[in-house]
Image (cartoon, helix red, strand yellow):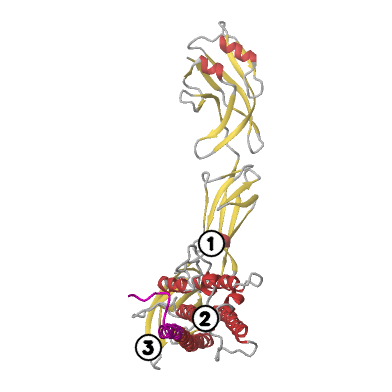
Amino acid sequence: MAQSNTKLSPRQKMINLMYIVLTAMLALNVSSDVLDGFTQVEEGLSRTNANVSLRNNAIYGQLESLAEQNPEKAAVWLGKATEVRGESSRIFDEIESLKHEIVMKADGPDGTLEDLRNRDDLETASVVMLNPITRRGEHLRLNIDNYRKYIESIVTDSVKSASIKASLSTEPFKRKGLALSQSWEEAKFDNQPVVAAITLLTKLQNDIRYAEGEALATLLNQVDAGDVRVNDLNAFVIPQSRLVMRGGNYSADIVLAAVDTTARPSVFVGGNNVTDGRYQLQTTRSGSFDYSGYIEVPHADGSVTRHPFNSSYTVIDPTATVSATMMNVLYAGINNPISISVPGVPQAGVNATMTNGSLSRSGDGWVARPSAIGTDAVVTVTATLDGKSQTVNTTRFRVRKLPDPVAFISYTGANGLPERYKGGRPISKATLMGAKGLGAAIDDDALNIDFNVLDFETVMFDSMGNAMPEKSDGANFSGRQKDKFRTLSRGKRFYISRIRVKGPDGVERMIGTLEVIVN
């Protein structure tokens, strides 16, 4: 007969009780092993942090040494490295402070990281890091985000930058057994044993030291990033100009290709040492001249190599080019465009003056405005050479009165563009009736100047040959003139005379007669 499951013998009860106790003891042993494992990991990470700090100190020491040897090249990178160390130490110390706060919360004011007693405390880390009032965990996350972005802006290597981004990531993620994602601080410190929280913070310090080291290494590499590596050295002569005016200075830079400007080699011309590698001499006569020399380059092993060079320069007499862009004369009372240039001298270093009128700059050119007709205008050009003003050219121009313009009737052609009727050919009666009046201009391509028409007369002849003059309405045809036009038949002609005009020079004049043939 089977034994009832609800009634156990004393022996069976003892066996079951021993099983429960043994199971509990086994669970306690596993938990203790896990806690010991966290402790060992934390100790290993602390040693790693110390080693990484030594490596970072060595890199920073190299930057200090380079900055001391060559401040011009390395000082700026040392300054950036100092800033990196400051930012890294600030967040490293913040994490260290959080570790001590968690330990003292768990073990009391006398608690230390070296002798953690309540390693399995599941509440302390949450109380310190997730307190809704102090929000220490959120504050740490934001500081890590800012630090990560700062380091990424310095580390240019994409692989290293991606590694730093991954190790210092504070993105939310979902823990096993939870339906929703948690914030970084909740996932790291909620319901975590004290020893696990301390280990996580030490790992974070390790990531900070790693990121700091990569940033410092990047800055160290930048010291020589701009250097050009060459296996062939050549001497070069770079003159400011191979063409020099008599009285001016010839100047040339003598350099070695890819030379470091902070450690110049020695330059010799004609056996004489050239200061700062710049060869300069006063020119006293015209002609072509050659010169030669050598550059001495010291090497790290104490040896010195010589690199010869030779060059030449040409000295010319002072000269300038002055030309009138409107024919070969200047016209009184108007603006005459003038082109003035001196070879080898920028426009800012060229000046000019003129007699019998005024001369002024206009953009890249000049404008001459003579005053008296019949008196020559003399243009004097000076140029600034080696800091001194020197006269380089004097040019004389004849000054004339503007020639008379040609009168014309302005109308719109078949193509819709303005046309000018100057006589000598038939013009349709409809075109004549549509014209407003008379114009006058010089438009021979050399000069293009408009004149104002003051008044004029039209002269027609009756069947008896009698002249019938009619006065204009200023520059426009008068009503009586228009009435006369209507009576004209094909083939008839009339004349426009006594045309009085005024030019931009202010002079009034009478110009030639215009013959009009009606088509």
- Boundaries of the magenta span: 1-27
Q: Position of residue 44 (x, y in %)?
A: 46, 88
Three-letter amino acid code at the position of disc 3: Thr
Residue on which the image places disc 2: 205
Report the mark closest to the observer, 2 or 3: 2
In the rendered picture of this protein, how many numbered marks are placed on residues? 3
Q: Is residue 382 visible?
A: no
Q: Position of residue 19 (x, y in %)?
A: 42, 84
| Relative to 7, 248 lies left or right | right
Three-letter amino acid code at the position of disc 1: Pro
Q: Position of residue 76 (x, y in %)?
A: 54, 78
Q: Marks 3 and 1, how far apart in space? A: 39 Å
Seen at 64% across and 69% down, the residue is 132
Q: Position of residue 130 (x, y in %)?
A: 60, 72
Chief secondary structure of the magenta portion: helix
Residue on which the image places disc 1: 346
Which numbered disc covers residue 305? 3
Report the mark closest to the observer, 2 or 1: 2
Image vertical order of residue 189 relative to residue 27, above or below: above
Report the mark closest to the observer, 3 or 1: 3
Q: Marks 2 and 1, how far apart in space? A: 62 Å
| Relative to 10, 466 lies left or right | right
Q: Residues within 10 Å of mark 3 (few under 14, many from 20)?
A: few
